[in-house]
Amino acid sequence: MVLSIDLGSARGRLIVLFMRHCLLFGEQITRLIVSKQRHQIACVYYQKAR
């Protein structure tokens, strides 16, 4: 898991909430990258095998 989150910003807090959302719904986050230069959020995740 690769994490780069700025918790001092509203965007960073929003990302944490989104991570919790993914985990609560039984999804595993494989990559969550925050690019401070491009101001974009990339989140790649997949559902657990049933």
Image: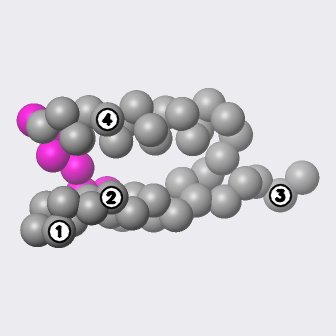
The residue singled out by tag 1 in the image is 38
- The x and y percentages for residue 17 are 40, 31
- Say which label, 4 or 1, has the lower sequence index: 4
Distance from the alpha carbon under mark 3 to that under mark 4: 27 Å
Distance from the alpha carbon under mark 3 to that under mark 1: 33 Å
The residue singled out by tag 2 in the image is 41
Instruction: Please state which amino acid type lies under the numbered disc 3.
Output: Ala
Report helix, strand or loop for mark 4: helix
Instruction: Please state which amino acid type lies under the numbered disc 4.
Output: Leu
- The x and y percentages for residue 12 are 23, 41
Distance from the alpha carbon under mark 1 to that under mark 2: 9 Å
- Say which label, 3 or 4, has the lower sequence index: 4
Report helix, strand or loop for mark 1: loop
| Residue plotted at (31% across, 35% down) | 14
Q: Nearer the viewer, residue 20 or 11?
A: 11
- The x and y percentages for residue 30 are 53, 62
The residue singled out by tag 3 in the image is 49
| Label ID, residue 14 | 4
Distance from the alpha carbon under mark 4 to that under mark 1: 17 Å
Residue 48 appears in the rendering? yes
The quarter of the picture where the N terminus appears is bottom left
Q: Nearer the viewer, mark 3 or mark 4?
A: 4
